[in-house]
Image (spheres, rainbow, N blue to C red):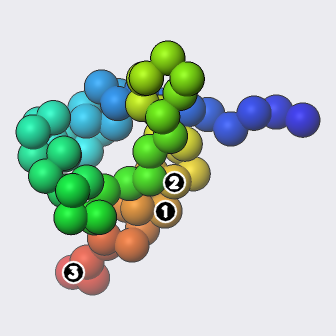
Amino acid sequence: MARPKMLKLAEVLEEIEMSRAAFYRLRARGLAPKLIKLPNGQLRCRRSDLDAWWASHEVAA
């Protein structure tokens, strides 16, 4: 069984074109994509969670 693709926080920030500070403000309000904290303290985001977050923020043109 293949493990889901896990993105580093820097990769997430680059993809959503957001600064680390702005991301943490969004996270504090509960509006950021779901993150997973690894035992070594690093943060990861599943590709599926980021895609779902993008889908929930789409605006019809």
Residue depicted at x 34% and y 30%: 9
Q: Nearer the viewer, residue 3 or 35?
A: 35
- The CA span between labels 1 and 2 is 5 Å
- The CA span between labels 2 and 3 is 23 Å
What x and y, as percent, mark residue 1? 90, 35
Q: Which residue lies most toward the bottom here?
A: 60
Per the rendering, the mark at residue 38 is none
Question: Secondary structure under badge 3?
Answer: loop
Per the rendering, the mark at residue 61 is 3
Residue depicted at x 9% and y 39%: 21
- The CA span between labels 3 and 1 is 19 Å
Circle 1: residue type: Ala
Per the rendering, the mark at residue 52 is 1
Question: Secondary structure under badge 2?
Answer: helix
Per the rendering, the mark at residue 49 is 2
Sequence-first tag of 2 and 3: 2
**Disc 2 crowd, CA 10 A, few/some/many (<14, 14-19, 20+):** some
What x and y, as percent, mark residue 34? 44, 53
Circle 3: residue type: Ala
Q: Is residue 14 left or right of residue 39?
A: left
Q: Is residue 11 left or right of residue 50?
A: left
Q: Nearer the viewer, residue 28 or 5?
A: 28
What x and y, as percent, mark residue 57? 31, 70
